[in-house]
Amino acid sequence: MSDTKILLEESAIPTHWYNVIADLPSPPDPPLGPDGRPVSPAALGAIFPPALIEQEVSTERWIPIPEPIREIYRLWRPSPLYRARRLEEALATPAHIYYKYEGVSPAGSHKPNTAVAQAWYNREAGITRLSTETGAGQWGSALALAGQLLGLHVRVYMVKVSYHQKPYRRSMMQTWGAEVVASPSERTESGRRILAGDPDSPGSLGIAISEAVEEAASRADTNYALGSVLNHVLLHQTVIGLEAREQMARAGEYPDVVFAPCGGGSNFGGIAFPFFADKAAGREVRLVAVEPTSCPTLTRGTYTYDFGDAVGLTPLMRMYTLGHDFVPPGIHAGGLRYHGDSPLVCQLHHEGLVEAVAVPQVATFEAGVLFARAEGIIPAPESAHAIRAVVDEALRCRESGEPRTLLFNLSGHGHFDMAAYDRYFNGELEDYEYPEEAIRAALERLPKVG
Ligand SMILES: *Cc1c(COP(=O)(O)O)cnc(C)c1O
């Protein structure tokens, strides 16, 4: 029997990140300022270091990974690729199912792949502090870890409801030396303004972003770090797909379809882009982003310019959007509740080069539990979206008798999400289709460009 785990030696950690921009059929549309004119990269210098701004706009296909970053990657990379033999058996499918497991990082998800890189480039630029926001806590813990490993002070503005509802994510960040502030806070002008209007505001990701950006913009020693969406973040995540491609080759296979959950698009881009390089060179492979029906950005959003945040502080980016003031329902996959998506993923979807499907919440948890019972690992609710889509494809293979090879990214474990599993077991979770009128109404409030 062939191996269940396909492991690479540490020397096989990629030496370069893959930049998908080099293989796009047309150049990406630039971010625009409030005046409708392209934002100059230099304008981002108040909150990002020069090396990351360069990566944001680079058209080089391969970007070298600095040795000190590879050195830190060794703590958990290369991550294992598994053949999901027991899941295949449970589904009685002729499909071959593989998954790349990013839950082996100390923070339990793929996010440290970029957190470490961002912290390192900031330190090289003489920055001593990073500010960021976190909703469910996954990005905050990844950056706290990276700050600890590289000696940077990290302040995390954590959405106030999560601060109280997810105390263990908060303690995790504190264990790694980060300072966690419930947002809205009294520390920033943005926070004070919200609190003046509503002292009991539960906070939102949009408000927390405003606080973190304001702090970075107003202090020379401090920069801002974002956990998804931006080109350089997806670039750093390509270590996932580069390793997976090598691991599939060692297993003597090549995927027919690659799946990943999609929130801001970073773990999807991370696993899918290196396979897109093969697709651009003529190889047949389907790349499928999986999102919740409650936040159906790629499947039901509009491809246009919109703000990246709720308040309208960021440049306008061309992407699929549900409207920047979209209020996601309280679904239990915090990492997938974003009104937009990475502009690179959106462009590829718009050009018909990557696909998207939306799956409902209850069926997603059902697939997550099926996976945990077959394979042992309890998936993060975000990751369970990809599992739902893979299970559906594997069942179609059972119908048709086709032995397709399926690969998905298991972006994280669900150990901090057991309250959501509890609600599933108690029958308290509901499916939520985002209503068409709400989508139309939000789009009427889009910024007017051109
Ligand atoms: C944050 C997160 C996601 C969604 O973010 P992307 O940028 O779309 O990858 C998915 N899975 C896990 C485990 C996460 O922590």
Image (cartoon, grey):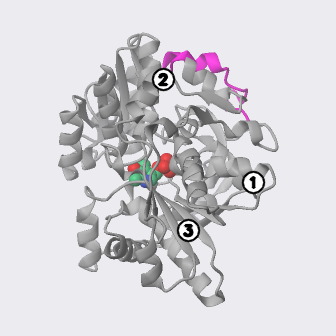
Task: Identify residue type, mark 3.
Answer: Ala
Residue at 61% x, 55% y is 249
Q: Please give the label number shown on residue 358.
A: 3
- Please give the label number shown on residue 5: none
Say above or below: 44 vs 170.
above
Mark 2 / mark 1, whichever is N-terminal: 2
Q: Distance of mark 1 from mark 3, alpha carbons?
A: 23 Å
Residue at the spot x=44%, y=27% of the render? 69
Q: Amino acid at mark 2?
A: Glu
Magenta: main secondary structure: loop
Query: Which badge, 3 or 2, is on the more N-terminal residue?
Result: 2
Q: Above or below — where is 415 with respect to 142? A: below
**Which residue occupies the foreground of this view, 306 or 239?**
239
Q: CA distance from mark 2 to mark 1?
A: 29 Å
Q: Nearer the viewer, residue 380 or 319?
A: 380
- Report if the beta carbon of the residue with label 3 is closer than 8 angstroms to ligand 1: no
Q: Residues within 10 Å of mark 2 (few under 14, many from 20)?
A: few
**Which residue matches tag 1?**
279
**In the rendered image, which quarter is residue 199 located in?**
top left
Magenta segment: 28-50
User: Is 42 covered by the magenta stretch?
Assistant: yes
Q: Is residue 210 left or right of residue 339?
A: left
| SS at circle 1 | helix
Residue at the spot of label 2: 67
Q: Quadrant of the C terminus?
A: top right
SS of the residue at dot 3? strand
- Circle 3 or circle 2, nearest the eye: 2
Is any part of residue 213 visible from this angle? no
Element class at badge 2: helix
Q: Disc 1 residue type? A: Lys
